[in-house]
Amino acid sequence: MAYDLRPFMQWIMTEFEPEVRVGPTAGCYARRRDEQFTHLYGVADMACVLYAMDALHPDAEEHASWRRELQALQDPESGYLLAKPADHGRLHNTAFALAAMNLLAIAPLYPLRFADAYLTPAAQQAFLASLDWYTNVYAHSHDGAGLPAALTLVPGTVPREWFTAYFALLDSYFVAENGMMGLEKSAAGDCDQIGGTFHYAFLYEHYHRRMPYPERRIDAILGLQLDSGEWHPLNPWWLTFDALYLLTRTVRFTPYRVDDVTRAARRVVAFCYERVMDAAFRNDPETTPHKLTAITAIFAEAQHFFGYDEIITDRPLRLVLDKRPFI
């Protein structure tokens, strides 16, 4: 079956984008349609959405405006880029904003001085040990992946060997029975692990490293998919993308259950397409730039997996994770 996304993409450009734009210049976006001030998760998310649609091509004046908005987010003392009012955590803020800057070839004004606290192997180990690998793998992966992503996005902040040591520590957090990350998790795995493992998966991809236990990971994620095509009704977009990405990227390197993965991915596309083509979704105030970042990422990954004849757009979609390691 073919899914024509062109009406959805047109809606984003002609209706949604003007609703979240809060200034006369480029790069000024709110995080919600009912807010009237620029916010990190408006500016950075809209950069992601426009990039995914191949619509992020600012001229010199527009690029300067994007640069002002993004660079203004940085605290000059610590180097963190911070959301105001606060949203997510400062490591997620920083990595997400730096990742948006990467799409536009913009560098931060100040060095990432906060990195000094994480330079040694002992500091790395203590940092990862401080995260909750038992019941909050997903939430804490924002920090666990945000730190190395931010350091990757500002080359030269730490030596290459820093990442080698970090990955060696990450490898120790995989559960052999389900191929995902965590401690004291069930053999079948859970959605907390899907969301958490995903945030490290794009770093493994970026550094051309393979996550261990690929067959068990495929088994676990397929076993957790609901009949609807999603993985959790309270998190239908981000967790769905997380699971889809883990499946499609894992079967790139193993033929294990590839037909089952293909069927699961088709259920994802059908579920998501039905939702986004519904007027209720488009009119919902909870349809935000951050949500659209997840949705365009789902369709971009699906288009790469199935081809342009099945996921129809005017221009090929681009997955931001193939450009930089954070979302």
Image (cartoon, rainbow, N blue to C red):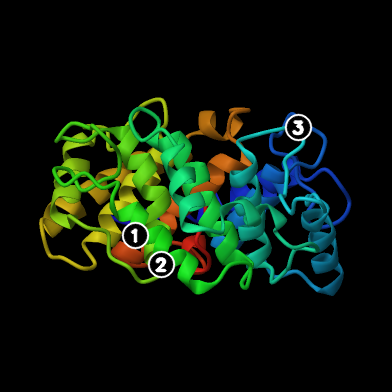
Can residue 70 be seen in the rendering of this structure? yes
Q: Nearer the viewer, mark 3 or mark 2?
A: 2
Considering depth in this image, is 127 or 6 the residue closer to the camera? 127
Q: How far apart are the alpha carbons under marks 1 and 2?
A: 6 Å
Where is mark 2, residue-wise?
164
Where is mark 1, residue-wise?
168
Considering depth in this image, is 274 or 236 the residue closer to the camera? 236
Where is mark 3, residue-wise?
85
* Quadrant hosting residue 61: bottom right
Q: Are marks 1 and 2 in contact (CB under 8 Å)?
A: yes
* Quadrant hosting residue 301: bottom left
**Could you tell me the amino acid type at mark 1?**
Ala
Image height of 306 relative to 191, above or below: below
In the figure, is residue 39 to the left or right of 138? right
Query: SS of the residue at dot 1?
Result: helix
User: Split into 4 quadrants, where in the image is the N terminus?
Assistant: bottom left
**Could you tell me the amino acid type at mark 3?**
Pro
Image height of 304 relative to 234, above or below: below
Q: Residues within 10 Å of mark 3 (few under 14, many from 20)?
A: few
User: Percent position (x, y) of residue 82?
Assistant: 73, 44
Query: SS of the residue at dot 2?
Result: helix
**Could you tell me the amino acid type at mark 2?**
Thr
User: Percent position (x, y) of residue 168?
Assistant: 34, 60
